[in-house]
Image (tube, rainbow, N blue to C red):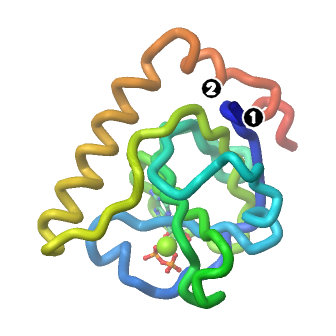
Amino acid sequence: KSLPYFCRGEVVRGFGRGSKELGIPTANFPVSVVDHLPADIGTGIYYGWACVGTGDVFKMVMSIGWNPYYKNTKKSMETHVIHTFNEDFYGEILNVVMVGYIRPEKSYDSLEALIAAINNDIEEAKLKLELPEHLKLKEDNFFTSVT
Ligand code: ADP
Ligand code: MG
């Protein structure tokens, strides 16, 4: 009901869970952005579009989960942009539109199972975002009006 949901915020440091070591870095939003999430956006995996600063708009997958730093009382939002960047972008503004929901969060028996699930999510996001109603959000003023 709240989708598509547009938001932007500074990229902050995560909990150093080593997402990058898994080959799947996730850019974290600050609590101020997470606090604005509508109540009906629950935890789980979402897909959509993202751009860093005034850069190009790329496909993304986002995990919304319970933030261990805040004793699981607050949600966290972690975006994996489906693009290979030459450098980290901590401190830059990440602009995203969450377009659809993929699945609830799960715990996995192994790292391999987790990585396989995330790679499935990425493939599903890539396919879904090719739908015309989703493609048009890539061109939304939300992204083009970023200065
Ligand atoms: P942290 O725990 O600080 O979030 P990660 O291992 O999850 O560390 O790495 C996230 C950081 O990697 C992001 O904040 C960003 O600066 C950088 N990064 C590089 N490429 C990407 C990408 N494709 N998607 C998301 N973040 C990326
Ligand atoms: Mg991260």
Q: Which image quarter holds the N terminus?
A: top right
Q: Are marks 1 and 2 in contact (CB under 8 Å)?
A: yes
Classify mark 2: helix, strand or loop. helix
Position of 34 with respect to 119 (left or right) is right
Give amino acid for label 2: Lys
Most foreground residue, 27 or 87: 27
Name the residue carrying label 1.
Answer: 143
Q: Position of residue 33 (x, y in %)?
A: 78, 63
Q: Is residue 43 above or below residue 58?
A: below
The local crowd at label 1, few if under 14, some if 14 to 19, many if 20 or more residues have their Cα within 10 Å, is: many
Classify mark 1: helix, strand or loop. helix
Name the residue carrying label 2.
Answer: 138
Q: Position of residue 39 (x, y in %)?
A: 74, 52
Q: Residue at x 75, y 54 (%)?
A: 37
Q: Residue at x 37, y 74 (%)?
A: 19
Give amino acid for label 1: Phe
**Closer to the N terminus: mark 1 or mark 2?**
2
Q: Is residue 94 above or below residue 51?
A: below
Mark 2 lies within 8 Å of ligand 1 (Cβ measured) = no
Q: Which mark is residue 57?
A: none
